[in-house]
Structures are given as structure tokens and as C-alpha cells.
Image: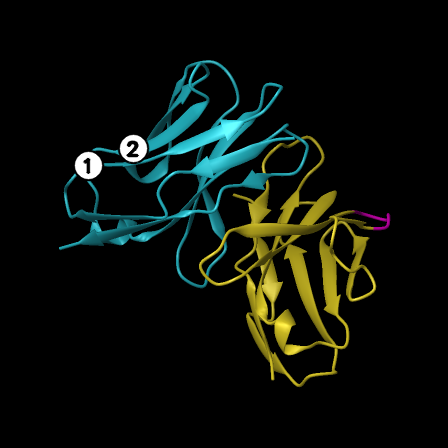
Chain colours: A cyan, B yellow
Amino acid sequence: AQSVTQLDSQVPVFEEAPVELRCNYSSSVSVYLFWYVQYPNQGLQLLLKYLSGSTLVKGINGFEAEFNKSQTSFHLRKPSVHISDTAEYFCAVSLLTEKLVFGKGTKLTVNP
Amino acid sequence: GAVVSQHPSRVICKSGTSVKIECRSLDFQATTMFWYRQFPKQSLMLMATSNEGSKATYEQGVEKDKFLINHASLTLSTLTVTSAHPEDSSFYICSARFRSSYEQYFGPGTRLTVT
């Protein structure tokens, strides 16, 4: 079975600062990795995904993530955050057509 | 992109009544739909997976007689919470996927409050 650990439940940062949201996964087989963002009282929006190929994945809104197989990590990064990036971020894994397994989420708060 | 809608966005019902939540894929045929439940400040918990024309597959610990799921067409799935109780109050989110795709498209969610 797969599992996902998001190491930080809350991350406060100042506007225009860089941010990294950490995600580690556990699986006995190769998995596919996703980052989703959830704004208050809304559904989830896909930020980016890793299926295969280049380990550096670029997504929407200036986010990127790096897949590290040896460390079983898929950390999300943004070089300069905006107030509008304040949201909940979820890391998830799946076996493609199988169900998604989500981490517990990281609340990113960007302060002026 | 693929759009999924949910209706209603918010619903308040009295304890003991049933409430139905609809999930629609607006611009694609969803061969598989998923229903999630999210408690405040927590992650999404998969409740069940439904394939069009088949019975839903429920996750362990989810009462299938309480949470009735119907996926009668390729664009509509419904979740009925029967004999709702205050502990059923939660945020319910659906997602949909079409046959050849790995990606799930999420609806905006439905906030259920049982009084």
C-alpha cells in the first residue's frame, strides 16, 4: 500500500520569499505523484504531476517540484510567493488508474 | 479543461432526513467517479469509487447503506446520505475521470450541515 507524509502542517512565509513544501511517500512499487491546491471552501486543483521522465516538474502558478526516487520525496517549491498563494496544499500518490492517496495537507500562509 | 460541478454547494438538513448530492461532468464522459469526505483542517478521505453502470466500491469502514452512491450515466453520479446525523456533517467532494485518463477532475465540494 502507498502512503504520503507531508512533514509540515503549516508553513508561514512572507510575500516574495521562497517556499518549499515537503512531501515524502512510501510504496513498494513505482508510483505517480501529484500536488493539488485547495482554496477555502473549494475543490482541488491540480498544480503539477510526475508520471515519468524529467525529475523536475513545472506546474501552474510558478510552482515546481522535484522527484527524488532515492529519498522517496516530491517537494514543492516556488521561488517567490504571493498573497494569493495562501491555500492548503496536498501531495498525493497513485498507481495511475488506481485511487489517489493524499497526505494530510500543508497550510501555506503568505503574509504581507 | 474538464469541468466537474456539484449541487448543492451547501445544504442544511435536520437529523433523520436524507440528502442527495449531485456530481456532474460537464464536458466529458466520466467512466469513473470518486466520492471523498473532508473533515475540517484534514485531508480527503476516499469513501467510494463508482463506475458507470456498476455498483460502487466502498472503502473499508464506509457504511454503504448510509452513503448510497449511484452512477447511472456517464455524466452524473449522486451521493445520498440517508438518515443523516450531526456526525455526518462534513465537506463532500467528488471527482471524475474519463476512460483513458489518469487524472481526476474535482468538483467544488458540498458543505453538509446536519442539525
Q: Is residue B26 magenta?
A: no
- Residue type, label 2: Arg
Crowd class of label 1 (few under 14; some 14 to 19; many from 20; radius 10 Å): few
- Determine whether, in the image, residue A44 is placed left or right of residue B54: left
Q: Quadrant of the C terminus of chain A?
A: bottom left
Q: Residue B66 appears in which quarter of the rendering?
A: bottom right
Secondary structure mainly formed by the magenta segment: loop
- Element type at mark 2: strand
Residue A93 visible (yes or no): no
**Sequence-earlier tag: 1 or 2:** 1
Q: Is residue A15 left or right of residue A1?
A: left
* Kind of residue at badge 1: Pro
Q: Residue at x 44, y 14 (%)?
A: A70
Along the viewing direction, whichever of A45 and A33 lies nearer the viewer: A33
Residue B24 visible in image: yes
- Picture coordinates of residue A97, whole percent (x, y): 67, 31
The reply to whether callout 1 and callout 2 are in contact (CB within 8 Å) is yes
Report the residue marked by disc 1.
Answer: A18
